[in-house]
């Protein structure tokens, strides 16, 4: 650095009102020149400035910790949702067993009715018609139960926000919801098959 000149140092501190600029002489270049001279300031001002910088750093760290804590706090327990989905799945499994059993009986009865129609009597036509009527009524009951299960699933889906859960919990919830979707579709198909079997019996008798 050559020549001489003036530098201005921004002084920040309490009791000074607005910030002020103070000139500081820049010495001639010499072997003993040090940049420390550029930042010459009263020791009190440097101490205050250091304290302010310390406060800023600490505040920044605290804000970062608070932000991290808030992000972690957003992750809620998946246990209530998983329990609700498991309960719905159990109801769906039990309903599926009932519908499947009914469907087997209806198909057997429909086959018997069709055999009767071909001149090979196997069962009393009156009993078959009663069974067909019972099958239709049961199908309506099954449909109502299935609608309740589906309503429960839709309620869970409407409340589900993957951002609220950790990755593992979100995966478990979505897996159960997918299982229920497939189960509901399968049960509905079987209920329709029960109604179709009842119609077959009606046509045969």
Image (cartoon, rainbow, N blue to C red):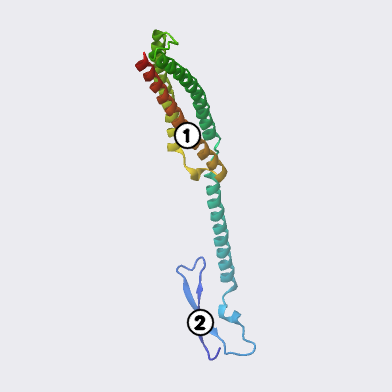
**Which tag, 1 or 2, sits closer to the chain's start?**
2
| Mark 2, residue position | 7
Q: Nearer the viewer, mark 1 or mark 2?
A: 1
Residue at the location (44% across, 32% down)? 185
Residue farthest to the left, as pictured: 203
Q: x and y percent of residue 111 in the render? A: 44, 18
Distance, label 1 to label 2, CA atoms, is: 77 Å
Q: Nearer the viewer, residue 35 or 44?
A: 35
Residue at the location (49% across, 27% down)? 92
| Mark 1, residue position | 182
For label 1, the SS is helix
Residue at the location (51% across, 32% down)? 85
138 vs 80: above or below: above
Q: Nearer the viewer, residue 121 or 89?
A: 121
169 vs 125: above or below: below
Residue farthest to the front, as pictured: 119
Q: Which mark, residue 64? A: none
Q: Hey, which quadrant is residue 132 in on the image?
A: top left
Residue farthest to the right, as pictured: 32
For label 2, the SS is strand
Instruction: Name the image quarter holding the N terminus.
Output: bottom right
Q: x and y percent of residue 120 in the render? A: 42, 12
Q: Hey, which quadrant is residue 30 in on the image?
A: bottom right
Callout 1 crowding tier (Cα within 10 Å): few <14, some 14–19, many ≥20:
few
């Amino acid at each position: 650095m050559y020549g001489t000149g003036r530098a201005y140092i921004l002084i920040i501190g309490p009791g000074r009102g607005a910030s002020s600029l103070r000139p500081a002489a820049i010495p001639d270049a010499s072997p003993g020149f040090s940049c420390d001279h550029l930042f010459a300031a009263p020791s009190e001002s440097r101490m205050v400035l250091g304290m302010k910088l310390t406060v800023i750093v600490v505040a920044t760290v605290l804000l970062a910790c608070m932000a991290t804590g808030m992000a972690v706090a957003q992750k809620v327990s998946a246990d209530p949702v998983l329990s609700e989905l498991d309960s719905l799945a159990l109801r769906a499994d039990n309903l599926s067993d009932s519908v499947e059993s009914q469907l087997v009986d209806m198909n057997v009865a429909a086959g018997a009715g069709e055999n009767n129609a071909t001149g090979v009597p196997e069962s009393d036509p009156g009993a078959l018609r009663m069974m067909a009527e019972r099958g239709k009524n049961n199908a309506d009951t099954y449909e109502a139960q299935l609608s309740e299960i589906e309503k429960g699933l839709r309620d869970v889906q409407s409340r589900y926000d993957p951002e609220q859960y950790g990755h593992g919990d979100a995966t478990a919830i979505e897996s159960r919801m997918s299982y229920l979707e497939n189960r509901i579709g399968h049960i509905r198909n079987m209920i329709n098959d029960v109604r179709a079997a009842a119609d077959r019996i009606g046509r045969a008798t």
